[in-house]
Amino acid sequence: MNEETKKQINARYERELNKGEFFWPDSIFKDAVVSLGIFILLILLATFVGVAGEPKADPSDTSYLPRPEWYFLFLFKFLALYGQIPVVGKIEWLATVLVPSIAIGLLLFIPFVDKKQDRFYAKRALPLGIMFTMVVDIVILTLISDVPTVAADDATLFVKLSASLQPYAGLVIPGVVMALLFFLPRVYKDISWKSMTWLTGIGSFLMIGLTIAILTFAPKLESTETELASTLAEQIFAGQDLYSLHCVECHGDDGKVTVIEGVEGLEGKAISPINSRDVLYTVNDASMAEIIAYGRPDSGMNPFGRMYNPEGLSKGEIDYIVTFMRYMWDDRFEIPAEALKPLFPPLFEGEVPSYDVHIAPIVKRYCVSCHREGKESNNYWMDSYDNIINMGDNAPNIVAGDPNSYLLQVIQGHEIKDAKGEVIIGVMPPKSTLKPNVIDVFIRWIMAGMPRTAMDAAALYVQPTPAVTPTP
Amino acid sequence: MWKNIFDWLNERLGLNDLQKSLLERPEPKGNWWNTLGSASLFLFILQGLTGIFLTVYYTPSPDHAYDSVNYIMNDVAFGWLIRGIHHWGATLMVIVVFVHMLRVFVTASYKYPRELTWLIGVGLLIATLGMGFTGYLLPWNQRAFWATTVGTQIAGTVPFVGEFILKALRGGPDLSALTLQRFFAGHIWMLPAVLVGLIGVHLFLIIRHGESHWPKKED
């Protein structure tokens, strides 16, 4: 650039300054307004949207679908689409290194590539067209980042379409538009900025249209909601539920079992009571979590971590169990008051319990540990309302209004024998007895005809007849 | 009395000169789009302040990072607000910086005499994205862990030196306590230092050359 142009530019800027304003107080006022707006927006976002919870990192859970921060999603999608290109698509570093390097290089050297001194938009159709196409591409790549890039062979036509349209929307059309923008002015010297704008507009229109099609045809994603325990009480509850499911069979619901009974393969194994000071004072949280994850083969403890079993416990879940054990049994820890809530709300006279409110938490605590898929339990799974009523080799285990229902008999200490006098169902739970108020819940529930929801149960409520006080 | 204090300070600091050169400088007619740069600076300062508060409780170790973030969210007074602002501030900062860059591109403000301001700006953009990338791992949750696993893997595909970059980022072949420590150091020391330095030069250049005027037909 020669000195003459520089002088012209500086003189032009002087003219603008003379017509202009002062930084203080004119410009800074606008700056302050915008910053204040941003600050208020942030407080609103933090208060009303908050930060979504996520489970703790678990290196053994390789099934987790990685997702970068949202502003990298377009790069992620670009890489996925790039991988679909035949031949070059297999050379990964072209997309991961070369393309981004060229992009950053271009960005850096724009002042040296675009050397013309024109600043008015109508004189800059090429750079603005390319920029606009790139911005639209970044936006649509971000929008379609969750739509699968490859459809399964047995997918519906629409789903296949939503996958196969993506390379056109994200790579082909923007590529063609940018190439045209670049080469047309070189072939037709007098092309007007309006034609260039039309070209950019049509390209973006096509890209956005295809994106809408892709999003409409996209398969519905199943949202996998994982329950997260954030407060201490919630963690203790979560740990208790997991303990009831995975640990009770051997360690008992209070952790004081010293000899395992009735568990296949571990029958008669002597173990240390895990609610004892010996265990709780000598093993710290980290070691406890490791014992649960990796097991202790010599003393019969099976590994429960996900690295041994795809359906095993995650790191976060193991931590919940450890928290539960500490606060429940370790006398150096004081259990928070809100964690001492009873398993089910106590029943008053004449009240009918429901599955949702009373039976489900009881069954989860005392029964499901054995009565579930993959356990020897006469095929009686107690994992849902329907299964509790209908399943099992000896079904029906529950008959509405029948006080001699199998389930009621075995929880009250009576074995069920067949015609030949052989025991077909033993006493339940096998090693302990339920508390009388728990048995009472079962009796009332079955006698009232097993209502499912709290509303059904309330409808069955019978007002107890008040005792007649004899009048003297 | 106040006048005496001011005069004393003015004599030593040159406040009047500063006021003339920094605050009372003439500018072209203003435009709301021109506020995006100062908005980015405001967000950077806000991120810095909330970040400093977060480090009071945050522990960069795989055993405690997740729980310490949980503690900030549930037990520290207004911890949820500080973290919420930091979390959303990161998102907003990327948007504001990006739109700021688009504005500069549209008005062609990167041309003479402001080429160097643009170069520094690109550096600021990359450093901001680096802050996003390193900060994402710190809560040590599933999302963070696996996104970083994949992100660092991508860096590992660079021909010849990829293996070295991957190990340098992770501090070993896999994501571990070292990775978290490294990202933490990068997030709170290295990248902010780079950002502060670049912002300083960026601001100096803006004051030296003035804000560009909105282009008209004759430009």
Image (cartoon, coloured by chain):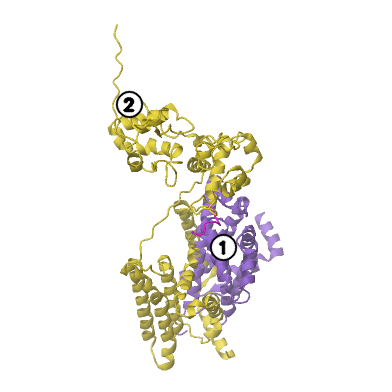
Chain colours: A yellow, B purple
In this view, B134 is above or below A20:
above
Q: How many marks?
A: 2
Residue situated in front as seen by the camera: A137 or A382: A382
Let me know if residue A65 appears in the view. Answer: yes
Instruction: Identify the residue at horizontal 43%, vertical 33% (top origin).
Output: A428
**Which stretch did the figure color magenta?**
A56-63
Helix, strand or loop at label 2? It is: loop
Which of these two is toward me, A238 or B121? Answer: A238
Q: Secondary structure at mark 1?
A: helix
Q: Position of residue A168 (x, y in %)?
A: 39, 77
The answer for how far apart the CA atoms under marks 2 and 1 are is: 64 Å
Q: Which of the pair B101/B145 is nearer the observer?
A: B145
Residue B128 appearing in the image: no
Instruction: Give the amino acid type for the residue marked by disc 1 in the picture.
Output: Phe
- Give me the chain letter of mark 2: A
Magenta span main SS: loop
Q: Chain of mark 1?
A: B
The residue under label 2 is A350
Check residue A59 for magenta coloring: yes
Please state the horizontal and vertical placement of residue A382, each as a whole percent of the image: 39, 41
Quadrant of the snapshot with the C terminus of chain A: top left
Give coordinates of residue A42: x percent, y percent.
48, 57
Residue A4 percent coordinates (x, y): 57, 90
Camera-near label (2 vs 1) is: 2
Q: Residue at x 59, y 59 (%)?
A: B48
Q: Which residue is labeled 1 in the image?
A: B44
Q: For residue B165, which quarter of the picture? A: bottom right
Q: Point out the residue furthest to the top here.
A: A472
User: Which disc, if any, is residue B216?
Assistant: none
Residue in view at x 40 percent, y 82 percent: A177
